[in-house]
Each structure stands twice: as C-alpha cells, then as structure tokens.
Amino acid sequence: MANTTLYIMAKQNVAVSKEEVELCDVASLYCEDEVTQAKANALKIHRFRKGQQARVVVSMLRVIELLTQLCPGITVESIGETDIIIEKASLEKDKESQKKGIWEFVKIAFVALICFFGSGFTIMAFHNDIGISDVLARIYELVTGTASDGYTALEISYSIGLAAGIIIFYNHIGGRKLTSDPTPLEVEMRNYERDVNQAIVEMADRQKLEEDV
C-alpha cells in the first residue's frame, strides 16, 4: 500500500441527482491496485441535506485528505481541477421545464428577433457612419462613368458578400455547421462558463474566510 499511487482527474463542474456524492461522480481515477481504486471510487465526499444550498465547492485538498485517511500510505497525484463545483440537480424540476415547450419556444423566438434586428440595426448604423453608400456610388461612377442609382451590382455583391462572410465567420447555417471547428459563439460560451466557475470558487473561498473570522 505504501508504494501505491492513485491518479485522480477531477472535473470542474458536475451536476448530480443523488444526495450522497461519491468521488467517482466528480472525477476519473486510475490505480494499479484495483482494490484501492474501488475504495476510492466509492469514497463519499459530500452529502446534500435539506435546506442546504444546491451548489457546493469541494477542494481537492479535502478529497486528498479523505483518501489518505481511507487508504493510509498511498500517494495521490491530482492531474485535474483544484476545486470541484458540485450542483444538486432536481429531476422533478427538469421534467417540469420540459413540459413548458411553448414558453421555451417563445423565449427562443424573442431572443432570435432581438439578435436579428439588433444586428441589422448595428450593421446599418455602421454603414451610415462610414458612408458606405457614398463610397460604393463613387466607385461605380469612377469605373462605369455613370451615376449610381443605389441599386447597382456593387451594392448587390456587397450585400451577398456580407451575408456570406457572416455565415463563414460564425461557421453555422441553419442547424448545420460548415466545419467541425467550434463556432465563435461556442468558444465565447466556454470562456463565459470558465469565468463563472472561477467566480463561484472565489466566492466560496471568500465566504469560508468570512465564516472563519
């Protein structure tokens, strides 16, 4: 047991539906000793009680402490997150939210309309600010020698190119992706989730310090 090494790769954010949270629910473990690995997988690291907050932050130092108490003499190598955010998921609430299909559709449609008209207004305001219509008219007049009526091949090709550029940039059209690469929105959402998780961990640490004082 003294030479046994347990490798643990903890996840950053985990949602569980049971009261007692075991280590295997929030992390992946590997150990050459199958008995030690089985004990570590079944280790209970938290228990949600009634009236308690549905989200808790568990430090890996606490997990390592519990592991060394469970299996004295083992070496624990943490190759994952330093803090684990565990959230108690409610299956009943999930079922209720799935029943509200019409309300979810209304919210999606509302957000889609805001994005559509908001983006359109932004593009029009930008074009008006730089005077794109005057620029295209001037270019058309220099090339063809005739005055532009505002509906020439330049305006049409520019509009098509603008739409194509937006589609290519966002790597998404309809319900399909053009390539397997993540879209800019997906990248920003992952960055947002990472910032939120970091803020949750820092708030939990600050709250713990305030309680100790």
Image (cartoon, rainbow, N blue to C red):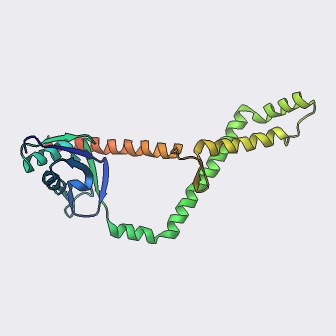
Q: Is 108 placed left or right of 144 in the picture?
A: left
Nearest the viewer among 166 and 55 is 166
Residue 40 vertical position relative to residue 203 in the rendered view, above or below: below
Q: Is 142 placed left or right of 80 in the picture?
A: right
**Residue at the top extreme, as displayed:** 142
Residue 9, x across and y down, in percent: 26, 45
Residue 57 seen in the figure: no
Residue 44, x across and y down, in percent: 16, 56
Residue 158 vertical position relative to residue 113 in the rendered view, above or below: above
In the image, what residue occupies the spot 88% across and 29% down? Answer: 143
In the image, what residue occupies the spot 26% across and 40% down? Answer: 79
Residue 153, x across and y down, in percent: 84, 40
Q: Is 62 placed left or right of 110 in the picture?
A: left
Q: How many marks?
A: 0
Nearest the viewer among 181 and 144 is 181
Which quadrant of the view contains residue 89? Answer: bottom left
Quadrant the C terminus occupies? top left
**Residue at the right extreme, as displayed:** 146
Q: Is 75 placed left or right of 160 in the picture?
A: left
Nearest the viewer among 208 and 57 is 57
Residue 148 seen in the figure: yes
In the image, what residue occupies the spot 31% across and 53% down? Answer: 14
Quadrant the N terminus occupies? top left
Residue 120, x across and y down, in percent: 66, 46
